[in-house]
Image (tube, grey):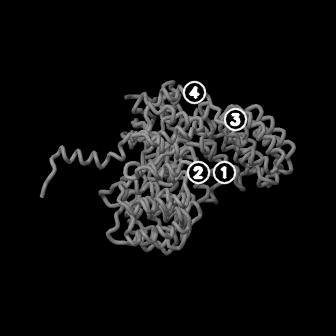
Amino acid sequence: MTTLSNAGKLLLLLLLLSVNIIPQFRADHKELIKMNYLRVYDKTALREFLQSDDSGTVNAALLTVANSGDTSLNSAVRNLGFKKHGEYIAFALGKTGSPADASFLTVKLMESTDDLTASAAYQAIGKTGSEENLSRLIILFLENKLPNTTGFPLALLNFHLRKITSPEVRNTLIRILTGTGVDVKLKAYAMMVLFRTGPRPEDEYFLQQYIIPPPQSDEWNLMLSQYTLGCYVKLKSFPVTESLMLALLSTPWFEIKINGISAISNSMFDGDQKVKIYAEFLKSDNRTVALHAAVNLKNLRFADSLTSAAASAIYQAFLDKPESDPVLKGALLESMMTLFPQNAPNLFKKYRDSVSVTSLASIISGKDYSSPENIKKLIALYDSESPAGKIAITEAVLKLNNDRKTGTDFADLIFSLLDSPLPYISGTVAAGIDSAYAKTNSAKISEILIAASNNQVNNPDFYETFAAYLTLAGMTGDSLVEKLKEIYSTSVISSVRSLAGVQDGTKNNALFELIYNSAFQYSTAEITTTAGIFTVNLLPQFAPLSAGNFIYLALTSYFNNLNFHRVVPGFVIQGGDPSGSGWGGPGYDIISEFSPLHYKPMMMGMASAGKDTEGSQWFVTTGNYPHLNWNYTIFGEVVSGFGSVSGTGQGDKIISVKLRN
């Protein structure tokens, strides 16, 4: 047998990988990048780019076609060499195609393709295919005529998200999950789709084997366990034994522990020892784990009443938490008041001043603590609170008003909050007013919305607020909707104009030059936070405007001292908002830059309120979340400091961002 030298093996490896390492966008692709920025596409120029002899240029043009949404170039896209550009052809057709394109891609799948191309083709079929395409895809897969890759479950998911399904989807998922010799990666993706499409109680017979990952697990075993636990959460059932609880308590994998807590807390507890083990989660040195356990504590169910020994274990965990952590203390207080209703009044009286206003607002907006005195004290805290606290108080007022059972008239306060210059407050109120209240107070609401829209029409932070205004206006009558759209059509902010249906390509050219000139200037970013340091490889070849925007802002120290305002354990950490509310940004918006990259753990993406509404907020995923693929911009990947990312809690700060080549 002939063997390859090391050099030969390296050359072969490079040849095998070449389709995936060819650059896409480069600094010399300014014309393509600007087309995307303006959302104005020169079809003649695009056709020329698609015919380039340079593979990177063709791939960049395919990404541009995909983001244009223009179907008129699909014929030219299909005529390109599939072996060379298959992943990008599939992506472009997946964003712009039709059932005919799904049929084209199914034929291509039956030919030899690499895994990334097969994955993109499968996903595109799911995004464009018909019920007939779905049936044919399943038949061909079960007949082993299609690649046995993770793309197949993703196709089923994409069909499901478009409400195209059949009984064979579930049957096929079960065959994959119960089959012998099936690759764990394929099982992991199949479990993710089962979780997304809805598990059934009868699935528990095979779910149990995947709860705890093997000792030497890779990311696919972890993903399989993560979504297995997610299925149990949806089923609100879990085989909660002491040995299984101890295994979850001792697991070294953060995401398994987090999902395990969620699954456990939906189960029936039938013994003191299980309660005591749960109390150990509350005592965790990892604040995120302890907080997640505290939030979920209220969901515990007991076969009999809690014994004094079990109750004592929970009380002790509560008392051990420092007064200096009002968020954790507040989450525990809410759960304790639910678990021990007979002691709730005393608990509330004793600890109300040592918990976060978010917890306080949640408790007071409940039926038992909404006395005029408590409401007055809560509202008095508004002016001195953080954005999160202000939002919590506002939501509590809306809930109390919508319940209409407190005897308190909130009208003046609600109108004042609706008229707030803070977008996150005005938007929260607009989204929280019910239709009955809107109709009764239509004149006052119309007055406020028109004035606020005129005052803030050029403020990009108000995009989500304006969208909420339109929904609220629809409750009062079509004439107000049209008046607001007329105002939004005059905005200098393209995303705001889009609310009025205006797509005119008018953008800030000076801003484009700043962002474009930054895009390829640095290759990595070292982000120092109060939770540690992590390093990101920036990906301007896939998202030049997003990477350039991040670099441009980082060079001005924009991100320094900003909070991670949103942390969902096991899902994402999110920062970049100067207001700390989730509604803020840099004073302008940039476009979405979708690509065929996958949202695996440690991918860095742009947060948005819809297509082309990105600004300065970004997130890092802490698990596999394929449902985000193709729908959110990816512009970076964390390559070191994974523990710092996973250990980030809500309220941790970004200290600095250092850019390097």
Q: Is residue 618 rendered to the left or right of residue 400?
A: left
Query: Which residue sits at x=57%, y=39%?
Result: 41
- Which residue is the site of mark 1? 363
Q: Is residue 45 rendered to the left or right of residue 524?
A: right
Calculate the distance from the C-alpha at mark 2 to the C-alpha at mark 1.
9 Å
SS at circle 2 = helix
Badge 1 crowding class, 10 Å Cα cut-off, few under 14, some 14 to 19, many 20 or more, is many
Q: Is residue 88 rendered to the left or right of residue 393?
A: left
Mark 1 or mark 3: whose residue is earlier in sequence: 1
Calculate the distance from the C-alpha at mark 3 to the C-alpha at mark 2.
30 Å
> Residue 172, how many percent across, how many down?
45, 71
Query: Is residue 260 among the parts visible in the rendering?
Result: no
- Which residue is the site of mark 2? 333
Residue 454 vs residue 558, the one in the foreground: 454
State the mark number for residue 422. Answer: 3
Task: State if disc 1 and disc 2 touch (CB < 8 Å).
Answer: yes
Q: Nearer the viewer, mark 4 or mark 2?
A: 4
Residue 463 vs residue 658, the one in the foreground: 463
SS at circle 3 = loop
The number of numbered badges drawn on the structure is: 4
